[in-house]
Amino acid sequence: YNVPAGVYVGGVFPEGPAAKGGIAPGDFITAVEGQKVWSYAQIMRFLNRKGPGQPVKLEVIRPPRFEPLNFEITLAELPDI
């Protein structure tokens, strides 16, 4: 079994930006804004350059078909902790 290159999505918050944008548990994020990614840290660097309400384009591979899919998510405000 070959694991695709990219960052595995273990879960998403049901009402969070990823879920609203079509990202699902089990997906592999392979690119952000057209740039290939292979680590969570890379994804966070891209997301930190944007602010709440801004769109972010993601390329995803979803098992079992492993065909590239394109999604756009809209970033949300981070909750106060």
Image (spheres, grey):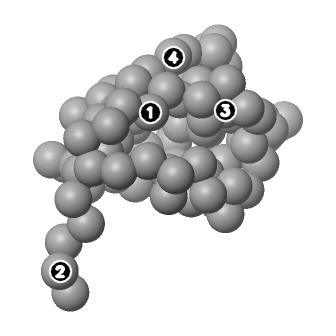
Classify mark 4: residues with Cα within 10 Å, few (<14), some (14-19) or many (20+). some
Looking at numbered disc 4 in the image, what kind of residue is underneath it? Asn
16 relative to 24, above or below? below
Rendering quarter of residue 77: bottom left
Residue 75 can be seen in this image: yes
Classify mark 2: residues with Cα within 10 Å, few (<14), some (14-19) or many (20+). few
- Mark 2 or 3, which is nearer the eye? 2
Kindly identify which residue carries mark 1. 56
Looking at numbered disc 3 in the image, what kind of residue is underneath it? Ala
Kindly identify which residue carries mark 2. 80
1 or 3: tag closer to the N-terminus: 3
Kindly identify which residue carries mark 4. 70
Residue 38 x, y percent position in the rendering: 77, 48
4 or 1: tag closer to the N-terminus: 1
Tag 1, which secondary structure? strand
Query: Residue drawn 25% across and 66% down?
Result: 78
2 or 3: tag closer to the N-terminus: 3
- Mark 1 or 3, which is nearer the eye? 1
Q: In the rendered view of the protein, which quadrant contains the C terminus?
A: bottom left
Most extreme residue toward the right is 2
